[in-house]
Amino acid sequence: MIPAQFNPKDVEKKWYDYWMKNKYFHSTPDNRTPYTIVIPPPNVTGVLHMGHMLNNTIQDVLIRRARLKGFNACWVPGTDHASIATEAKVVAKLKSEGINKSDLTREEFLKHAYDWTDKYGGTILEQLKQLGCSCDWDRTKFTMDEDMSASVIKSFVDLYNKGMIYRGFRMVNWDPEAKTTLSDEEVIHEERQGKLYFINYKIEGSNDTLTIATTRPETIFGDTAVCINPNDERFTHLKGKKAIVPICNRVIPIIEDEYVDVEFGTGCLKVTPAHDVNDKELGDKHNLEIIDIFNEDATLNTFGLQFAGKDRFVAREEVAKELEANGALVKTEVHMNKVGTSERTKAVIEPRLSDQWFLKMEELVKPAIKAVLETEEVKLYPSKFNNTYRHWMENIRDWNISRQLWWGQQIPAYYYGEGKEDFVVAENPTAALALAQTKTGNHNLTAADLTQDADALDTWFSSWLWPMAVFGGVLDPENEDFKYYYPTNDLVTGPDILFFWVARMIIAGYEYTGKKPFNNVYLTGLVRDKQRRKMSKSLGNSPDPLDLIEKFGADGVRVGLLLSASAGNDIMFDEELCNNGKAFANKIWNAFRLIKGWEVVADIAQPEASKIAIDWYEAKLQQTLAEIEDNFEKYRLSDALMAIYKLVWDDFCSWLLEIIKPGYQQPIDRATFDKAIELLEANLKLLHPFMPFLTEEIWQYIADRTPEQALIVSEWPTMKDTNADLIPAFDFASEVISGIRTIRKEKNISFKDTIDLKVINNEKVATTFDAVILKLGNVESLEYVTEAVDGSLTFRVKSNEYFIPISGNIDVEAEVAKLEEELKYIQGFLRSVQGKLSNEKFVNGAPEQVIANERKKEADALAKIATIEQSLLSLK
């Protein structure tokens, strides 16, 4: 018994469990062509959000279609350890329990981190299953798995030995909340309103002063010079003198350098080498003292005197007040400037001098630039992102790969002495000890004499190996899986990590294998609300994806998202989209129930209307299949789905089923019924990648299937020859049917009553679909004539004229009056349009499209007038 309604809750778990039980998602190397996708690993402790929903639905569509097309489809899932975000969550949890990270050993902290990961780590992957994602769960990877970590360490050691990784004391981006350094790419620059403080510094040995302008008065405690431009005549008298820093009263030199912009502020620049990258360069050039005034949490240290221990922003206000009290603060002005913030914690970044590990990028990027921008071995969809890629890659800086965290792969550098160069880099302590003994010549060194670097590697340094490491390709490049599945086929991700992840994977791929990591990169847009705002928890405008699945079904949500998700373009999400998806699922379900509800009789003849309609639909199916294949080739998944949507909703449900439907309480012939089922099955195959649960449910209801016959592993429809001429011929016939139905509706002619139809066939249209017109128009007879038929209602399709003789239940006088009124209105409208087109100034000045629209209005009005006049002639 087929249920009256499609209920997603009844089928989703049933079919997902069935697919899992029969291992349809699992892939092992064989003689088929592989099709491989690796998931962009979500944060291990994350939960499903709308961006994940879109991204993973697209991947599932691609992998399910590949499976149907006979490829050995492999979609590798997994999660990222997300060092900054996860460590912050673990630290916060410990703090709520009265435990400080600083009170724990690294091993104790990592135990808490793994406990946290074990508790929350599987959530997002389980949620992906509810969406229908057909990942090979047997291959699930985590970036902190033993083999994955070993891959990262091997990569580090290899690059270090090649001279590409170095340790440097450099100005870095410091996140005082996460207490770690960040790469330039992890810093978001925001325009913010602040203040410009004008401060007087006394000149040593005189009553003179100089004025500097700064946005950060709290950093005066780190000033080690004041710099003037040697060409600035205003300050010639200051050359060779010294200034006194207010509050701390430290004497500092006045130096000269053309770096100073004479137009900015006062033309005098305070130099704080420990807290500004440009000041650091000046400091190095002029051998200035370096004074670091901040603790790692951006509170002032003892150099901040009475402000020690206070947050930098609190100190800023208090320092300004003291400067004002001392008469040193001249004035303040409102000032707009760019402020760097942490992508992860949103904290304002603090420039900080620190020993860090860096990867040289200048040579590494060259093959990756060539692959995307020259040879197009790797293609970005849409290609507009090539320019973004070019800008980033051609302006790349060395990558700061160390992080002051414990959660992550610990840097494999081992120190054995006090000097900066007293270290070795090795994959494990045993190898490190042997290296250290060789390097020092001291074979009495023991493991206890070595101390491993406390820092962890940047998470992206782990995930840039993802397409290789998930198949063991870093540790064992000759293994069967790696040689079979790599390079992968398609990567689906967001443009916001085009540099963080995509570009770096391309770099790593060429460095380690000489091959690209994937063929194509499909860049999705951002999911926004109806007001074009980015969805976020803080705005409260992001629905819970699982709530949407509960409300609309997974298929409904997938369709709702994908119908508006063209590559690279943002989605204006509205729940009504999911409702449309749900309605589409119900439409298909009802169409299936309609077919299965027909009584089938084997020995009745197939009606001519059914035969030609089936031939037409097969041609339409093939035309749509070609369109779908083209759209998939160009990664226009939204267009592919829309083509299927129109085929099924309009052509199959609204036209084909209406044509072949038997009369009330009448049976259907076997040939038509079997063809209807065959065409429905073809539709289900096209729909399956987008709506897996609904389609498998219907597929299994149609017939008893063995596991080998399940829809998920059936065959994608193949291209074959059909009569394409039937498509335009049917389009014409459908306009005729619509014309008949319009007249029936307007003139209150019951659809139960038959009518006669006469045609002047000016278009020389074939009679191919006359049987369809007879059935759907409930036409008793269709006759071709050479002149107008008096006493008839008329309509036109192109130049063809159609006449429906008036039956006795129509008030001819009322109809004439109505037509004359309509004719008068259309004639007035035509005069208005023609008035515009006869206005030379309008025609010469208006855009070409506007003129074309007006000419179309004129043509439509003339055609309408001709039809009304013909109807009036017939009635009079």
Image (cartoon, rainbow, N blue to C red):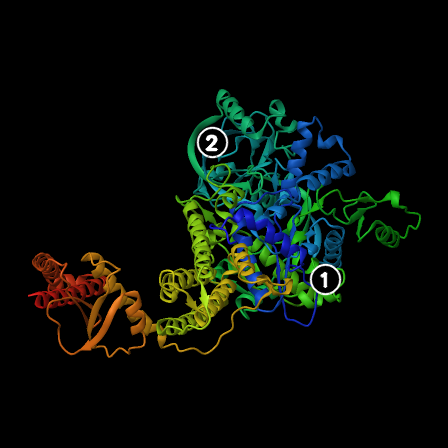
* Number of numbered tags placed on the structure image: 2
How far separated are the C-alphas under marks 2 and 1? Answer: 56 Å
Question: Residue 717's spot in the image, x, y percent?
Answer: 51, 70
**Callout 1 secondary element:** loop
| Residue 571, image x, y percentages | 44, 51
Graded by Cα atoms within 10 Å as few (under 14), some (14 to 19) or many (20 or more), the crowding at tag 1 reads many
Front residue of this view, candidates 828 and 508: 828
Q: On the image, numbered disc 1 is attached to which residue?
A: 473
710 relative to 463, above or below: below
Based on the displayed image, in which of its 4 quarters is residue 301 positioned?
A: top right
Crowding at dot 2, Cα within 10 Å, few <14 / some 14-19 / many 20+, comes out as many
Q: Amino acid at mark 1?
A: Gly
Position of residue 762 relative to residue 828, above or below, is: below
Left or right: 151 as drawn, with respect to 623: right
Instruction: State the mark number for residue 197.
Output: 2
Residue 250 in picture, x, y percent from top left: 61, 29
Coordinates of residue 191 in the picture (x, y in percent) = 45, 41
Q: Which mark is residue 867?
A: none
Query: SS of the residue at dot 2?
Result: strand
